[in-house]
Amino acid sequence: MATDKSISDLIADYQHGYSLKQDFYKNPQIYDKEMKNIFLHHWLLAGHVSQIPNPGDFFLFEFDKESIIITRSKQGKIKAHLNVCRHRGSHVCLKKSGNAKAFTCPYHAWSYDLDGKLIAARIMDSDFDKSENGLHQAHVELVGGLIFISLAQNPPSLRGMQEDLTDVFDQFGFDKMKLVKQNTYPVQSNWKLAVENYQECYHCAPSHIDYAKIHALALTPQKFNPFKETYLKETTSNVRTKPSSYYFDLAKEGDEGYQYERNPLLKGMKSGSLGGKPVAPLLGKINHFSEGASEFSVGPVTFFLIYDDHMVGYRFLPTSIDTCVADVFWFVREDAVEGKDYDLETLIWLWHVTILDDEKIIVDNRKGVDSRFYSPGKFSKMEDMEQHFVNWYINALKK
Ligand code: FES
Ligand SMILES: [Fe+2]
């Protein structure tokens, strides 16, 4: 039940081993703090370089009240400009994606080049300095072809992650993939209920019939742990099996949290698809199907599941305190040809149906959390990653 406690009391009162109090989902001051400490600070997946192959190509990356223009400059560099006119603040770019030579504000026609520099401002005094009125910039980092942005002045470092996982990115060919589909699923719940749901597979067996036929993670710990141990001992996969478990509460001060882990699929399952059948050519330097998949995550709201033949990305973003979106991205190797090497409907099937199931359980969860009778409940041991997320979240709010 909601209380009238201060934010710092609520944070201090968090009881380890339990879900969050209702205030964390409903209190607008907590939401403001989340914006500042989490979404305006940490690295967020904006998209992929294959969405903007040519100079002037752009798309908008948006969450809550923010809109960011992701574009490719004349020199081919990926840039991220805040979509807020330096005159009186109008959104400058109104199209969701396209190609532009410059971004001209629809209000009074100030015009910005692809680097965000102000290049034209009508009828201004002669002492007006255009060079001081460029669009605000977000930091951009590429992880292979994945575009991450941070709105912080001094973002957490991604260097440790980039160095630690060089071999993983190389084996899966992170810089040789293309994005072939992005679906946006609106969810009528606070963003944390969506992230928390993604963090645990306690719900997988009862809620995801199709997923549970493919992924060993849906098994009980008594069955999963020995199954995984045997898999890791016997796997012939040529990608790293050693986990990197920096994630969430374990990241070093100043570093972005990340995680890499390899998990088994059930016997005979090769990919995340109907019947576990292959759905695309093998990624990067993967040389055979090894009945496993890798989990990789960066920052608090971006997760990847890397099968031997395709990668699926998940990103959860708040659109308001009570609503969020789950974006799902499907990647294949860049030289794969649709219709010949992969069929799009077949490729996206598993995670499309799974996220629709998730959307339903998250909203049902939200309805109960909204109740005057909700109180924090005890986590199962299958919710250990969710506990890591909650620990990290509580710490992030303290800053
Ligand atoms: S608000 Fe953009 S030109 Fe005036
Ligand atoms: Fe799920």
Image: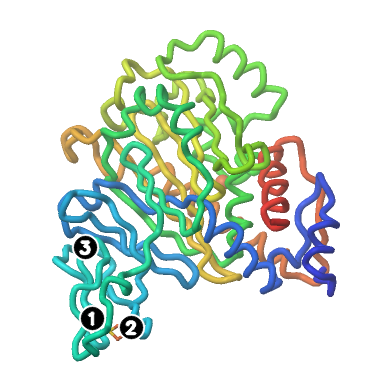
Quote the CA–CA distance across marks 1 and 3.
13 Å
Amino acid type, residue under disc 2 in the picture: His
How many numbered tags mark residues here? 3
- Residue found at x 42% / y 25%: 168
Amino acid type, residue under disc 3 in the picture: Leu
Q: Is residue 47 above or below residue 381?
A: below
* Image quarter for ligand 1: bottom left
Residue toward you, 389 or 310: 389
Quote the CA–CA distance across marks 3 and 2.
18 Å
Q: Is residue 74 left or right of residue 219?
A: left
Query: On the image, numbered disc 2 is attached to which residue?
Result: 87
Q: Are marks 1 and 2 in contact (CB under 8 Å)?
A: yes
| Residue 372, quarter of the rendered image | bottom right
Question: Mark 3: which secondary structure?
Answer: loop
Amino acid type, residue under disc 1 in the picture: Trp
Q: Is residue 28 left or right of residue 93?
A: right
Q: Is residue 94 above or below residue 224?
A: below
- Residue found at x 71% / y 36%: 382
Quadrant of the rendering where the C terminus is positioned: bottom right
Asked whether the viewer can see residue 202, the reply is: no
Judge: label 1 CB < 8 Å from ligand 1. yes
Q: Is residue 289 above or below residue 254?
A: above
Query: On the image, numbered disc 1 is attached to which residue?
Result: 110
Quadrant of the rendering where the N terminus is positioned: bottom right
Among the two numbered marks 3 and 2 on one chain, the one whose residue lies closer to the N terminus: 2
Query: On the image, numbered disc 3 is attached to which residue?
Result: 114
- Residue found at x 42% / y 34%: 272
Image spot of residue 345 (x, y percent): 30, 45
Among the two numbered marks 1 and 2 on one chain, the one whose residue lies closer to the N terminus: 2
- Residue found at x 32% / y 64%: 69
Judge: label 2 CB < 8 Å from ligand 1. yes
